[in-house]
Amino acid sequence: MGRFLYVALSDALPGREPELDRWYDELHIGQVLDVPGFVSARRFAAVEAGDGPPRRRKILMIYEIEAEDPAAVIAALRERRGTDQLIPSDALDPQSMFAQVYRPLGETIYPARDDKRLDRN
């Protein structure tokens, strides 16, 4: 069984950020995790860090999928869209939405703490 990341980027419609935050936290994340194959979820917000303020796709969702066939997991997710199993939010800007499944290439690399070599786990 493989591990994959499902990465989703989006924005709230202007002035609707609190509503979209509630939807993610109270409804959407749980509904996605109910789809067989999804094993974790984490939401991030873009921050200003040297390249100016974030302008587009300020919300990042990273879902972990564990499956032989990630396309089948995404198909199951799509089948639920618009039903009571995956309720959409009208606070989400549909023009901002982007999602993609990624497979890992190599191992996670961490800096070594006791010498100058990199640890590979």
Image: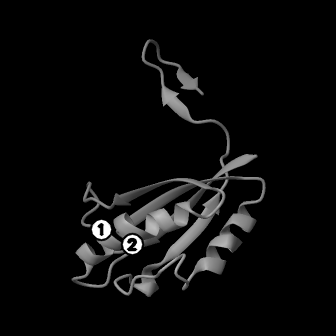
The amino acid marked with disc number 1 is Pro
Per the image, the residue denoted by label 1 is 54
**Tag in front: 2 or 1:** 2
Place of residue 113 in the rendered image (x, y in percent of width and height, measured from the top left): 42, 17
- Residue farthest to the front? 84
41 is higher (above) or lower (below) than 89: above
Give the quadrant of residue 91: bottom left
Q: What element carries label 1?
A: loop
Q: Looking at the image, which residue is at 24% across and 73% down?
A: 18
The amino acid marked with disc number 2 is Arg
Q: Looking at the image, which residue is at 54% across and 85% down?
A: 82
Q: Is residue 64 or residue 50 the one in the foreground?
A: 64
Place of residue 36 in the rendered image (x, y in percent of width and height, measured from the top left): 65, 60
Q: Looking at the image, which residue is at 47% across and 20% down?
A: 112
- Residue farthest to the top? 114
Place of residue 11 in the rendered image (x, y in percent of width and height, measured from the top left): 36, 76
Per the image, the residue denoted by label 2 is 57
Is disc 1 surrounded by few (<14), some (14 to 19) or many (20+) residues within 10 Å?
A: few
- As measured in the structure, the alpha-carbon distance from the residue carrying label 2 to the one carrying label 1 is 8 Å
Q: Is mark 2 on a helix, strand or loop?
A: loop
Place of residue 40 in the rendered image (x, y in percent of width and height, measured from the top left): 52, 52
